[in-house]
Image (cartoon, helix red, strand yellow):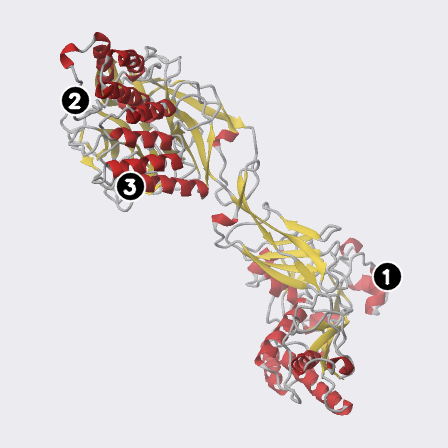
Amino acid sequence: MSIRGISLTFLSFFLTISFSGLAQEDKEEEPSEVKEANEAYESQQYFRAVELLKDAYGEVRGRQGKGEILFKTANSYRMMNEYKDAARYFERTVKIGYNDNTALLYWGNMLKAQGAYEEAIEVYQRYVKAEPDTNAGQQAIENARLALKWKEEPSRYQVEIMPDINSDAMDFAPIYGGDRRDNRTILFASSREESEGNDEDAWLGQSFFDIYTSSAERKGRRRRRGNDEEKAISYADLRWSTPVPVDEEEIINTEEHEGVAAYDSRKDKLFFTRCKQEKNKQLGCEIYRTEKQGRSWREPEKQIIGTDTMANVGHPSLSPDDKYLYFVSDDFNTSGKHDIFLTTYDRREKRWKKPTNLGTIVNTPNEEYFPVVHGDGYLYFASNGHGGMGGLDVFRVKLNDKGLPDGEVENMKYPINSSKDDFALNWKPGKKTQQGFVSSNRDGGEGGDDIYSVYRTPLVFNIEGVVTDAKTGKTIPNAEVVLDGSDGTSLTVTADKDGYYIFDDTKLDKGNTYKLSFKADQYLTGTSDASTVGVPLSSFDYVPSAKYFINRIKVNKALDPIEEPIVLPNVFFDLGKWDLRPEAMQALDSVVAILRNNPQIVIEMRSHTDYRDDERSNLRLSQKRADTTVSYLISKGINSKRLVAKGMGESSPFTIPENYSGYGEESLPTGVTLTERYIKTLSPEKQEIANQINRRTDFKVLRDDFVPADADQENTVAPDAQDIISKKREEAMKPGKIYVLKRPMSFGRIANQFDLNIRELKDLNGGLRGVRPFAGLQLKVEKDGNYAQWDKSHYQIRRRGADWRDLEKKTGVDRKKLEELNPDVDEDMLKPGFYVRTKPKKGEGSKQNKD
């Protein structure tokens, strides 16, 4: 049962259904059955009227008379929100030839309320043809199409039934109760059998409404993973106490209707609606105020709004600062059937001032209910006049500093709204909108109107992929994957035997960028980027069992094996020349990145020529080209001792591999070697392509144990790089600080402390490959610091499982001498990344700084 029916009865809003031109054909001789049915219908006793109208149908004659009975029967079902029966009777009304096309519009509405949007559109199109001078039908069509779109593209919110609270009666409009800090106690309206007013309501055929309360007892059913910043959970995941009347003394709950309540900000004063009803009469509704008095309640006081002591008012709601009281009424020059108003309290005269209508931004010619002002500055309300998904929908609108709407009304969309009636959206106090309640009579409920939990679904991310060999395509087992985040996150995982790795949703946050480093023995370290910034909701998959949206970011990485030469795409030279093209410089920049990611390797830059010209000339030309590439790399700051230039001439023609995807891939078959003999069998066009491929540059890793020394940059470098290096050396004269960890902490946190990023911190310390923070670990932490003396007197451990005997072999220093130089170092501290002293302290730079 929907709040449309509830509100009209519960608030006694005296809604009068007017049917112009529907006079019965023979009023003077109206049968008693027809008269009794009409009286029940006109007095809004729809539950009773339905059966009487069915009996009266056989007593009337003529198409128009029978059509009117069918229309009223259908409309009674509509007012009780029995949509299926209502649609069936509206269809019969249309088929019998009833002369009011409103039946067509209502028939479409009832189909729409059942979620049958396509069928509803067909009926609305018939209405448009029958009533071409009104835009109601066209607007209904647009709304139905919009509803279909919203269902296909749901919002981030989820809605769940509250099984501990709902009954087989009507339960709706929860508010947050308890003390000011208690947000797990609620008050709500219910027509369950325990109500004080247990007479049968003639409209609904149920008990009168009372106010009930329930509290969340403890966490239960499910725990949710994910680290969305709002930590949103569903109230349906909590266990709630059995609802009981808010008072047992009949002070608040009486034999009348009570419900739709509101607290002030301190939760001292409770405002609620009370409606009176006598047989065949609706006596109107009023707002009352009470407050707690020990374990009981003070006698409620009727609130007079303006000067109209007989005004029909209800659905009270206070703004978070208690300045404005919002309510619903069909009095005070209401523009529609029911409008939302606001008023303020005159403390001098001790009364509520004349109310202000919220105007046409909010109020329509139809019905608006359940105003709730949240701390985010929006008014949330229910309406069936702004279009939507069917029945009442929940909307919101921004308020200005005078409490009035300022901006456009927004539909809260699916799944907060459904094809049925959705209303009384109430968020947890504060400014956020992650948790709350909504009421609805949607399918799947416990009774008529039910209370649902609303929560903003967490967005979680996984970064996962497979590490493979770039040459063979085979997976690399046990590869190490390091993730460095813009938020300071630093994590390391090891791929499984199939090369698969994952950073799951417990480790990642939205709004960050991540750099991934992939490392494996006998492979060059590779890097990739990933981002969780600005990812649209459409890129996520909803996981019902876990209750979150997940975005699985796939980052597969192919690593180059050290023993195989690596061809650089686009490092080509014009015939007989050794000048670098612009595209060649871009390709060599990728080598700079590789060398920085792999600070321990020394490479041989190799330049090749085609077979044209004599062998000696080709060898000389290729050497010049290799020298050019090395000079470029040095100009980018690469240590010249890590580079060897070698001209290969025409001695090593290229073989097209199986997975070749470079220049000329569509012109040449795989598996062939581009020898002079083979190339001369090709067409002139393909010969030029093959020769261009042979004029390539590649590099080969010579060793992976490079350790820089203080004089590394004093060797001959390219002239254009020498000035840069000299300047850097002058800037680096200040002795560098050594930071010693007193306790384990993330590299990200350490880097932030010294205004570094994680990559800079790792580069300063030899890459920190396989290093995990531990107490006693020393780290260089000044990007421009001079660590020459430190490096002269220390050796950094690179491999796991080191002991003093291993270090003796590595450093050439006697084991006993090493132990004397490192008196405070236990053997269990000999881990990767640890610096072992190899020389006495004489002349060492800055002293060690402990955290």
Residue holding disc 1: 805
| Real-space CA distance between mark 2 and mark 1, rounded to the nearest whole angstrom | 98 Å
Q: Hey, what amino acid is under mark 1?
A: Arg
The residue identified by callout 2 is 310
Which mark is in front, 2 or 1?
2
Q: Which mark is residue 323?
A: none
The span from disc 2 to disc 3 (Cα, nearest Å) is 40 Å
Viewer-closest of 283 and 636 = 283
Q: Position of residue 603 (x, y in %)?
A: 73, 75
**Of the residues shown, which amino acid type is indicated by label 3?**
Gln
| Residue appearing at x 34%, y 11% in the figure | 198
- For the C terminus, the image quarter is bottom right
Q: Nearer the viewer, mark 1 or mark 3?
A: 3
Residue found 20% across the figure and 9% down from its top: 31
Answer with mark 1 or mark 3, whichever residue precedes in sequence. 3
Across and down, in percent, residue 807 comes to: 82, 63
| Mark 2, other Cα within 10 Å: few <14 / some 14–19 / many ≥20 | few
Describe the element under mark 2 as helix, strand or loop: loop
First along the sequence among labels 2 and 3: 3
Secondary structure beneath dot 1 equals helix
In the image, residue 10 sits, relative to residue 749, either above or below, namely above
| Residue 846 visible here | yes
User: Looking at the rendering, which quadrant does residue 386 occupy?
Assistant: top left
Check disc 3 and report the residue beneath it: 138
Q: Position of residue 480 (x, y in %)?
A: 70, 56
Say which quarter of the image contains residue 811. bottom right
Judged from the image, the secondary structure of the residue bearing numbered disc 3 is helix
Q: Amino acid at mark 2?
A: Met
